[in-house]
Amino acid sequence: MSLLDVGVTPPRVLVLGYGNPGRQDDGLGPAVASGIDRLGWPNLTAVDNYQLNIEDAMDAAEHDVVWFVDAAKAGPSPYAVHEVSPASSIEFTSHLVRPEAILAIARQCYGRSPQAFMLAIRGYEFEFIEALTPGATDNLRHALAMLTDRIRRLQMPVSL
Amino acid sequence: MSEVHVSTGQPGQGPRKIVIDPVTRVEGHGKVTIRLNEAGEVEQARFHIVEFRGFERFIQGRMYWEVPVIVQRLCGICPVSHHLCAAKAMDIVAGVDQVTPTADKMRRLMHYGQVLQSNAVNFFHLASPDLLLGFEAPVTQRNIIGVIEAFPEVGKWAIFIRKFGQQVIAATGGRRIHPRLCVPGGVNQNLSIEHRDALRKDLDQIIEWCGDALELHKSFVRGHENLHATFASFPSNYVSIVGDDGRMDLYDGVLRAIDADGKPIFEGVRPSAYRDYLIEEVRSWSYMKFPHIRSLGREDGWYRVGPLAQLNCCSFIDTPLAEAARQEFMALGNGGLVHATLAYHWARLICMIHCAEKIQDLLFDDDLQGDDLIVTGERRPEGVAIIEAPRGTLLHHYTVDENDQVTGANLIVSTTNNNEAMNRSVTKVAIDDLTGHEITEGLLNHIEVAIRAYDPCLSCATHALGDMPLVVTLEDADGSVIATRVKQ
């Protein structure tokens, strides 16, 4: 390695894929988490769950970049990406914890504000079937390719 | 953020209706409809949520031993409760009336971890902004971050109590998501010494924080006694399972129903006999069923379940800190029951203390390291089980054919049990707060506060982006929409 190639520790990346794989395309989030987990790259953590929960703030605070991945019932195919900022709101049921709230708790409790993105993958059917629809499967492939590429670029050593 | 849509209903043309409306069918939304009478007064209010009859059909045809795992797909909040309840029902199907001490205690440990963490989320994330900052605090501040700013320790309690409960689930079920502890007739693992010792280290702190949270909540009640007693409140019947001796038992027991004066309607009812005492009614306007006490009929037989019912129904709690807290709590009723809807939160905190104490007892019980995990019996065609999930009484009923395939499933979940009660709480809020034909921010807030007390479990753990959480609609007597307000 050249003395000019000074390796910098790549940012720690967290992928939180959430949804219910028992409800067809609602399983897109966990499917992404599973696909990312298989990469086995260092500094990369992939977690799946039915929904976001407040303790996810602890994990978010321990990473530099967080990707929230969920199915979308509307919006562009195959997916949409937007940056997420901390914000807190009150819901009427504990079924709802939003990415913005996770980031707000991470900032408030741990003083950490990771860069965060929402990856919304378009789904089409949400019945009691444990399989993605063909359209969602196709969207998943595109989304995984994009996300893998984004994470790979973060992991590449930086040259001065 | 909220949106308001106002229609052109004309006064004097019959009862009018206000709707708080969902956009999608899957999950993540609720809908409230407020109907006015000819005089423009609130006639009734209904809280609608989608239920999961489709799921009952989904189970049919499955092998019975698969069901405790499959039912975890039902709910993102309480998959563990469904896992345990299905396992208990399938014990019966497997011909097992009593699992081994190790299996029973492993399941109980998992259940107490589940109730502890779920109640913690409800109280800290959902309820504490209303209770600790006040109903009328600006909506921009009335959230968990506002609470943490005002009470920095609350954030720590919320995250660590929740995480501890999750660790209990992971230690018993092998993983925190989709745990696979139970099989018909028992469990497939005991508790390792390593996990036991790790959990023991944090337990005293968890119990202390639960007590601290209760004290903080009581300070709110002391400052708002009238509000706490009257908000969205009414006398009601209550249903819960209790132990054979009347003690609080959230995992197993017999059904007890009491009336608003605390007198028994029925008690000592085995789960298998539930249909002799409870009946489920279907109404055309709702996906949800309306269970009620058979002997009292549909008008008078509705009841409440959940932490408030668990406290009102039990005769005592067999853990010292929770029992002391129960006695103080019941004093609110001046010798009778506690009917305050906001008291759900106080009761929920007592249940958390009870669960933490139970976890402590179990972690010092060597049966958890036993090797006798499963017993077998002679197959039966039917199984019914009841458990007290975090939101209240949960019932699973299955029929299984000679090929071991499920032929029928009936699930009565806590939110269904509370269906009529939630409607009445919303109605009470509408009567107290609605003026004119405007869905004000204050009315929307108060409706949400009432619903949060019950923490309704929306269908089946799907929450894809694009759903709207709560929609309120005002209708006139002939169903014409006067106004709609959507909270996103």
Image (cartoon, helix red, strand yellow):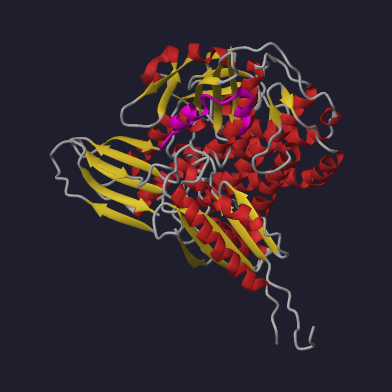
Quadrant location of the C terminus of chain B in the rendered image: bottom left
Quarter residue B311 falls in: top right
Q: Percent position (x, y) of residue A39?
A: 67, 59
Query: Residue at (46%, 48%) from the top-left corner?
Result: A134
Q: Percent position (x, y) of residue B319?
A: 73, 30
Quarter residue B70 falls in: top right
| Magenta run includes residue B68 | yes
Describe residue B294's horizontal placement relative to residue B387 as left or right.
left
Q: Percent position (x, y) of residue B412?
A: 50, 26
- Number of numbered callouts drawn: 0
In front: B485, or B352? Answer: B485
Describe residue B421's horizontal placement relative to residue A10 as left or right.
left
Task: For residue A99, say whether it is visible.
Answer: no
Quadrant location of the N terminus of chain B in the rendered image: bottom left
Q: Percent position (x, y) of residue B186?
A: 73, 24
Query: Residue at (74%, 28%) from the top-left corner?
Result: B187
Magenta range: B50-69
In front: B321, or B448? Answer: B448
Query: Residue at (74%, 20%) from the top-left corner?
Result: B99
Describe residue A100's horizontal placement relative to residue B103 as left or right.
left
In front: B456, or B266? Answer: B456
From the viewer's perspective, is residue B246 above or below residue B310?
Answer: above
